[in-house]
Amino acid sequence: MNKTIPLANGLRTDHPVPDLPFVDDSHLPLEDPTSLQALGRTADATTWGRADLQRATGAWLAFTTEPTRPHLAWAVRHHPNHGTTVLLIREQDASSMHTQWADEALLFRAGGYWWDGATWYRPGQVWDSTCGSYARRPVASATTVYAADLVADGDLAQGRIHPLDAFEDPDAGASPNWLDDLALWADVRSQRDAKPHLSGCVVRLAAPELTDNQLIAEHEFAQIGGIDVSDLDAHLADTTSDVPLPQATLAGHHWWSQPVVGDWAERRRRNPDSLVQVIAEQTSPSAPGPAEQHNRLRVLFASRLWQSHLHRGTWSADYPSIEAVDEVAAGLAADAMADLAGTLPVQDLAATVQSAIVNELVTHERLLRDAETGQFTEVSSFDMAPAVSRILDWLIRHQPAAAAKAISQAIGEAARGRGIPDACSARVISQSLHVSKLDRQVLRDYLERVLPPAGIRQELGSCPA
């Protein structure tokens, strides 16, 4: 999720960020990423630059410290078909911006919404561990707004381009007459016959979820996210927090799109700590798990201490009743349970479960395909071997985070190795857990947090769930 807030547009950018001023970038060698990198690599090593080529597409990205203003940096993203973005940013943000651009995103708008040259996506927040990337969630009914749609509304005579040495206040906020600035930018651009045409210069996106009447304020964010407003304020004040950037800030008040907040709430639900909590909070007395194991050990220890003639004399003075001995036994059982990971090789067990699931999926792959077409279907499934299902259920009940990792990696391995769609694998796993000793609703809640999130995925195929 990109959280870098740019300060200004470079004058030669092809995709100006709305409301940001334009700053002269004529000293930058934008045609050569290697030279751009070298600009920041000075002999005293107090500044830095970096360039990376994406050979498959001919695209490249680079950043460089501004030598004359070392607290600032330039970030540049070039694509042979979609042009070049040039941004002036804070120097401490250069590396993170570079990392964000290393993926498919060509530009960011509206608090992290991103564009890959064809489709707009919401900010990446929900991690899909089956393929090692964030779930891609396209923006519904998105429309790209280009410079050609806006320049006629500005007066280039009133526009302003800032010399770099005169750009003194990076926190000044939005340019007051930005459409005038845009008109002047377009005029300067036409004088050097720049490509792409204004009809290919992206300014922003428009979508129903980003209209004013659909954005939500902090109290609604907190309600959807399941946190207190005071906690949200603390998150917003923390620059390392995972709270998404607001889509708009008006008069000091932040506003978010509801889908972005919904994604953040889902991210929290999928946190490993929440998986443990889901299992720990299950209330069905017929659903064994750590509590049942603790009770079994407690009874065993109490019986040993109370009934054994060898130990009874030792306990009779200080612990004259079975209730008193039972309390001691409960403490011993808790200590034994706390050391479960040391007693059992949990990670090795999880890896074995992962391999077993993959083996089941690959061995019975034909059962997931249509007999006539050979294509994966939306409904076909099968039960894994009972022993595999039972040990997976045990792992879920006793080590929910380790089980989640085993499930996710098994789905990813089956997809990469045999092209089995993730939704098909998820269906098999879910169906096979009918043997689970967990409460049905608890299991359903757990699997909703573990199975691959909805969204378009870059590396793996998908069939409808």
Image (tube, grey):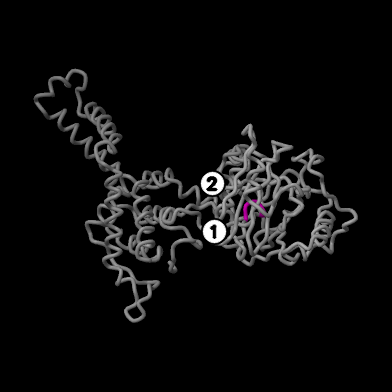
| Nearer-the-camera pick, 163 or 238 | 163
| Nearer-the-camera pick, 459 or 453 | 459
Quarter of the image where the C terminus is located: bottom left
Residue 55 is labelled as 1
Q: Main secondary structure of the magenta part?
A: loop
Q: Left or right of 185: which side holds 54?
A: left
Q: Left or right of 453: which side holds 302?
A: left
Residue pointed to by mark 2: 226
Name the residue type under label 1: Arg
Residue 243 is labelled as none
Residue 138: x, y in percent? 57, 62
| Nearer-the-camera pick, 84 or 374 | 84
Q: Left or right of 179: which side holds 3?
A: left
Q: Magenta stretch?
A: 109-113
Q: Left or right of 375: which side holds 330?
A: left
**Residue 186 among magenta residues:** no
Q: Is residue 36 above or below residue 389?
A: above
Seen as rendered, the residue at the extreme right is: 157
